[in-house]
């Protein structure tokens, strides 16, 4: 579903002769679409987010906890809640 907004973002980025882009997103649906468009345009991008997005707290699932206690995982890992 993000292919159309990503394509639109890519076309708007390519339509202007720029060396980089600052992306402003206000929702958790447009943020990945804009980043995908900038990546497709192969330009450096800075993302500034705001608006009604969830905080994105990370809660580790049982498999990650088991691997970490076994020593197979380092750093913060987990599934998004």
Image (spheres, rainbow, N blue to C red):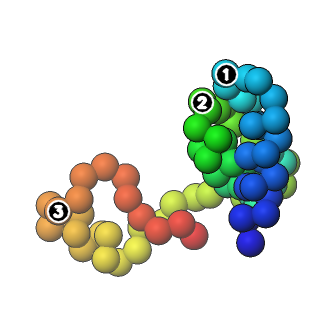
Identify the secondary structure beneath mark 3: loop
- Residue 31: image tag: none
Residue at 14%, 67% in the rendered image: 70
Secondary structure at numbered mark 2: loop
- The mark found on residue 44 in the picture is 2
Q: Are marks 1 and 2 in contact (CB under 8 Å)?
A: yes
Q: How many marks?
A: 3
Residue 27, percent from left and from top: 81, 54
- Residues at marks 1 and 2, CA–CA distance in whole angstroms: 7 Å
Question: Which quadrant holds residue 55?
Answer: bottom right
* Residues packed near mark 3 inside 10 Å, few (<14), some (14 to 19) or many (20 plus): few
In depth, the one of 4 and 15 nearer the eye is 15
Q: CA distance from mark 3 to mark 2?
A: 34 Å
Q: Earlier in the sequence, mark 3 or mark 2?
A: 2
Callout in the foreground (1, 2) = 1
The residue located at (24%, 52%) in the rendering is 74
Q: Residue at x 59, y 44 (%)?
A: 39
Label 1 residue SS = loop
Residue 35 in view, yes or no: no
Q: Position of residue 5 (x, y in %)?
A: 80, 58
Q: Position of residue 15 (x, y in %)?
A: 82, 35
Side of 81 relative to 30 (left or right)? left
* Mark closest to the chain's N terminus, 1 or 2: 1
Where, by quadrant of the figure, is residue 50 drawn?
A: top right
Residue at numbered disc 1: 19
What residue would you read off at disc 3?
A: 72
Which quadrant does the N terminus fall into?
Answer: bottom right
């Amino acid at each position: 579903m993000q292919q159309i907004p990503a394509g639109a973002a890519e076309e708007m980025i390519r339509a202007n002769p720029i060396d980089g882009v600052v992306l402003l997103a206000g929702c958790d649906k447009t943020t990945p679409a804009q980043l995908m468009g900038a990546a497709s345009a192969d330009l450096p991008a800075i993302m500034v987010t705001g608006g009604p997005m969830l905080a994105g707290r990370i809660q580790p699932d049982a498999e990650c906890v088991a691997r970490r206690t076994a020593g197979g995982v380092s750093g913060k890992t987990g599934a998004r809640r």
